[in-house]
Amino acid sequence: MANDTKPATGIKGFVRWAITPPQAYAVYLVALFVVAGLSFYLGTLKPKKAVGIAPPPPVSAPRN
């Protein structure tokens, strides 16, 4: 009755590896940097102008 436990591979193995204490800190920091980087990148994008919508008419002062 030998324990033939082979190491888990794939996503399960990565999750098991990532939640152990030393790696958990690194995984957390990497995820934090990825989220911050994506947030910064998406914040710098310019929105596309809608096609077929005219700009609003200019506002003028009322005449007496």
Image: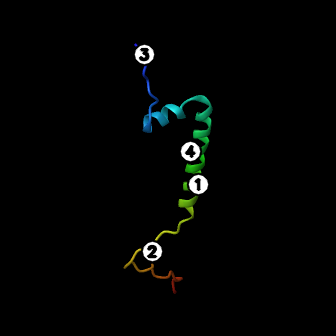
Answer few, some or many: residues within 10 Å of disc 4's Cα (few below 14, many 20 plus, some between 14 and 19).
few
Q: Secondary structure at mark 1?
A: helix
Q: Earlier in the sequence, mark 1 or mark 4?
A: 4
> Which residue is tagged 2?
49
Q: Secondary structure at mark 3?
A: loop
Per the rendering, the mark at residue 63 is: none
Alpha-carbon span between mark 1 and mark 2: 25 Å
Answer few, some or many: residues within 10 Å of disc 2's Cα (few below 14, many 20 plus, some between 14 and 19).
few
Image location (x, y in percent) of residue 45: 53, 66
For the residue marked with disc 4, what is the amino acid?
A: Ala
For the residue marked with disc 2, what is the amino acid?
A: Lys
Q: Earlier in the sequence, mark 2 or mark 4?
A: 4
Q: Is residue 29 left or right of residue 49?
A: right
Per the rendering, the mark at residue 31 is: 4
Image location (x, y in percent) of residue 50: 41, 74
The residue at the far bottom in this view is 64
Per the rendering, the mark at residue 2 is: 3
Answer few, some or many: residues within 10 Å of disc 3's Cα (few below 14, many 20 plus, some between 14 and 19).
few
Q: Earlier in the sequence, mark 4 or mark 3?
A: 3
Image location (x, y in percent) of residue 41: 56, 60
Name the one closer to the observer, 55 or 16.
Answer: 16
Q: Quadrant of residue 37?
A: bottom right
Q: Earlier in the sequence, mark 3 or mark 1?
A: 3
For the residue marked with disc 1, what is the amino acid?
A: Gly
Q: Is residue 58 above or below residue 39?
A: below
Alpha-carbon span between mark 1 and mark 4: 10 Å
Q: Earlier in the sequence, mark 3 or mark 2?
A: 3
